[in-house]
Image (spheres, rainbow, N blue to C red):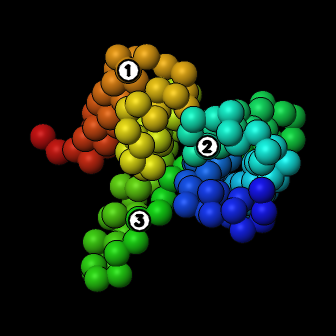
Amino acid sequence: MTQTEFLDIVTPFKDKVFRLAKRLLVSREEAEDATQEILIKLWNNKEDFGKYKNIEAFSMTMTKNFCLDKLKSKQAQNLKIVHSNYQDKSVTLQKQVELNDSVDWVGRIIEELPEQQKLVLQLRDIEQYEFEEIEKVLNMKPTAIRVALSRARKTIREKLTKTHSYGVK
């Protein structure tokens, strides 16, 4: 396989690999390093691509496992999960502050979710994966995916509502 053929296969989903790594590792630098490691592993195993039905799902599984291993390692004790890629330049300063505050709250709430719910939420709501793809990446049954996603969304909704209605009767 040539470099061009490899890039044609990997380019469409490399940004998804980065976003998942950033979701799990938070640090942009750590996510960039993780993405590079995944791409190197893919390059080194490019001759085995024929064995896999879905290279993208395989790559996302590799990314998830690599990042979780990194989080478990001693050097990653200070990493946490945060998400904030919402920007809208057409809003007022006050509205922007409120939106940033809401994104911060959602990030904090997501941090408290069980690991499985975090991953399902990331893949479904952020990366827009179909349930069948999530099933392959996380090796979960469709019912378990739907339950985890529902519980994650419910927890976020309840805690965000509680936070925003604080002091209001």
Q: Quadrant of the N terminus?
A: bottom right
Which kind of residue does numbered mark 3 sit on?
A: Tyr
Looking at marks 1 and 2 on the same chain, the residue that comes earlier in the sequence is marked by 2
Q: Is residue 165 above or below residue 29?
A: above
Q: Would you identify the image quadrant in which residue 165 lies? A: top left
**How many neighbours does mark 2 have within 10 angstroms: few (below 14), some (14-19), or many (20 or more)?**
some
Name the residue tied to disc 1.
142
Whole-percent x, y for residue 83 in the image: 51, 53
Q: Are dots 1 and 2 in contact, CB under 8 Å?
A: no
Residue at 48% in and 59% down: 84
Which kind of residue does numbered mark 2 sit on?
A: Ile
Q: Are dots 1 and 3 in contact, CB under 8 Å?
A: no
Closest to the observer: 147 or 167?
147
Residue 80 in view:
no
Q: Secondary structure at mark 1?
A: helix
Closest to the observer: 28 or 145?
145
Whole-percent x, y for residue 30 in the image: 75, 54
Q: Quadrant of the C terminus?
A: top left
Closest to the observer: 83 or 130?
130
Name the residue tied to disc 3.
86
Residue at 58% in and 45% down: 56
Whole-percent x, y for residue 98 in the image: 32, 64
**How many neighbours does mark 3 have within 10 angstroms: few (below 14), some (14-19), or many (20 or more)?**
few
